[in-house]
Image (spheres, rainbow, N blue to C red):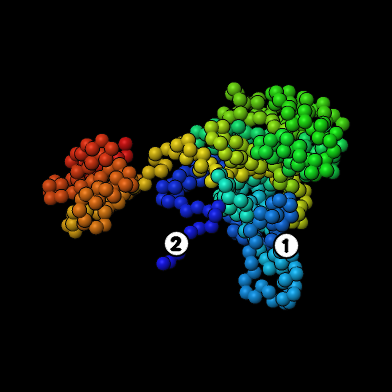
């Protein structure tokens, strides 16, 4: 007996209905991106490993999917070398390419490679899949789509303000209540200086970024394992637990960081971003959703240098559904220093799960065929074809059932696909130049002209 086929863990098939939902997400996001002047690009699924390695921190590098070289990848190596070389060293020899981990690093590579063609500031959006060799679990996949917007070539903090507005608009359009969290890597660097552990900034940010997932005690244990002193951990506690309004938090942290130049620079940037948003005329400034300064937000990626963002849905238990930040040094890795960038990434698959759980898809976004013509035979089908064409020209999604099978089977097909209208044409209808239109929701049916059919279905 043949083995039942399967797909790799952490990946999914999507049915026509699921694809309609995903396309609703992509189209909603795309419209908002374009509303703010962003233009679309695409990059290859695979990049040279030299492009990807070292850009995501040690933990991120472990999650890169590496692609085995084609042909004789063992060429030039002895059996002894293969047997004694470590897995990582073998991967370095056997794999020159990898699947992209995110869209930001490939975008930085794109900017440097095409810099002569670009008009700066360059505002791009990208909607493509990425891959991570992570442990699959609820809301976490090995293959998933990201929807990114980035601006490069501008130091202005108005870009951060716009990204907050884009984020708020997208989730407002979806009808999802979210909390938008914001922090600044400069503030985190200042905190590390203030507690006397400036050289452990990466260890500190990686640990406190897990606070929501593992809790304070586990975070403190990770800090101890990283070599952070008990005195420094004690100094960190009131900062981690800091509460109050955004302004109160900034005032408190400004007092802690008064001797840190970089920390105070981060405070200044946060005051500006929050001030511009708050000055716009509405209860929450220019936003419908809460914007919260969260000093424990760290985002583990090494390339962030300024403001960092993360979004969490309020009505669904799921991890971060959006995240990003400013990365002043990213293109410098590829030989183009001094080019500042800021961006944010929307996790389409997690947004998909949120909208599913909250049942927030509009009917018109997920419905397929709107009108089905029943096929009673060759002559009747020939009569229906031009009417179907007229309906399609009017923008109505229309099918003519291809086989002249029993009417019960054709009606079952319509019910299974939730087709709202069915048209029937027999001898009586053809003699009068009309069709019988049945509303599948109410059960009502009437004899109508082509024009009347289109008018009823359209509205």
Residue nearer the viewer, 225 or 425: 225
Report whether 344 appears left or right of 27.
right
Quick one: quadrant of the C terminus? Answer: top left
Q: Residue 329: horizontal and vertical position, in percent? A: 76, 48
413 w.r.t. 6: above or below: above
281 w.r.t. 129: above or below: above
Q: Residue at x 69, y 30 (%)?
A: 293
Q: Earlier in the sequence, mark 2 or mark 1?
A: 2
Residue 183 placement: quadrant: top right
**In the rendered image, which residue does mark 2 sit on?**
4
302 w.r.t. 262: above or below: below
Residue nearer the viewer, 2 or 29: 2
Q: Residue 358: horizontal and vertical position, in percent? A: 48, 35
Report whether 322 appears left or right of 31.
right
Residue 343 placement: quadrant: top right
Mark 2 in CB contact with mark 1 (< 8 angstroms): no
**In the rendered image, which residue does mark 1 sit on?**
88
Q: Residue at x 69, y 40 (%)?
A: 210
User: What distance separates the C-alpha of mark 2 from that of mark 1?
Assistant: 34 Å
Q: Residue at x 75, y 69 (%)?
A: 84
Residue nearer the viewer, 284 or 389: 284
Report whether 453 appears left or right of 316.
left
């Amino acid at each position: 007996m043949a083995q039942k086929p399967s797909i790799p863990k952490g990946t999914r098939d999507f049915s026509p209905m699921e694809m309609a939902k995903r396309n609703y997400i992509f189209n909603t996001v795309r419209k908002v991106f374009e509303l703010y002047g962003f233009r679309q690009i695409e990059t290859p699924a695979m990049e040279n490993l030299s492009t990807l390695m070292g850009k995501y921190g040690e933990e991120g590098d472990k999650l890169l999917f590496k692609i085995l070289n084609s042909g004789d990848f063992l060429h030039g190596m002895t059996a002894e070398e293969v047997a004694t070389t470590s897995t990582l060293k073998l991967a370095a020899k056997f794999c020159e390419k990898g699947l992209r981990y995110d869209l930001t690093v490939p975008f930085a590579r794109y900017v440097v490679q095409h810099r002569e063609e670009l008009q700066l500031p360059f505002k791009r959006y990208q909607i493509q899949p990425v891959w991570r060799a992570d442990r699959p679990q609820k809301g976490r996949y090995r293959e998933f789509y990201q929807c990114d917007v980035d601006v490069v070539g501008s130091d202005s903090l108005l870009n951060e303000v716009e990204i907050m507005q884009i984020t708020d608009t997208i989730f407002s359009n979806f009808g999802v209540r979210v909390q938008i969290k914001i922090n600044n890597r400069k503030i985190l660097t200042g905190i590390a200086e203030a507690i006397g552990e400036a050289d452990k900034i990466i260890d500190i940010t990686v640990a406190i970024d897990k606070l929501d997932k593992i809790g304070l005690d586990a975070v403190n244990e990770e800090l101890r394992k990283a070599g952070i002193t008990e005195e420094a951990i004690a100094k960190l506690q009131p900062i981690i637990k800091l509460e109050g309004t955004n302004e109160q938090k900034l005032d408190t942290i400004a007092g802690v960081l008064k001797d840190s130049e970089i920390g105070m620079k981060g405070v200044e940037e946060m005051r500006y971003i929050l001030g511009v948003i708050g000055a716009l005329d509405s209860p929450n400034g220019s936003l419908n959703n809460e914007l919260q300064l969260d000093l424990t937000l760290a985002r583990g990626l090494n390339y962030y240098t300024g403001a960092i963002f993360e979004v969490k849905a309020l009505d669904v238990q799921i991890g971060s559904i959006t995240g990003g930040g400013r990365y002043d040094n990213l293109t410098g890795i590829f030989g183009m220093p001094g080019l500042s960038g800021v961006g944010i990434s929307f996790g389409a698959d997690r947004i998909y799960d949120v909208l599913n759980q909250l049942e927030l898809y509009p009917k018109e976004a997920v419905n397929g065929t709107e009108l089905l013509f029943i096929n009673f035979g060759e002559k009747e089908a020939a009569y229906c074809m031009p009417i179907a064409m007229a309906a399609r020209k009017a923008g109505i999604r229309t099918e003519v059932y291809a086989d002249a099978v029993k009417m019960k089977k054709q009606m079952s097909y319509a019910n299974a696909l939730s087709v709202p209208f069915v048209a029937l044409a027999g001898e009586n209808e053809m003699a009068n130049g009309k069709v019988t239109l049945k509303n599948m929701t109410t059960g009502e049916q009437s004899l109508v002209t082509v024009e009347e059919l289109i008018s009823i279905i359209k509205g």
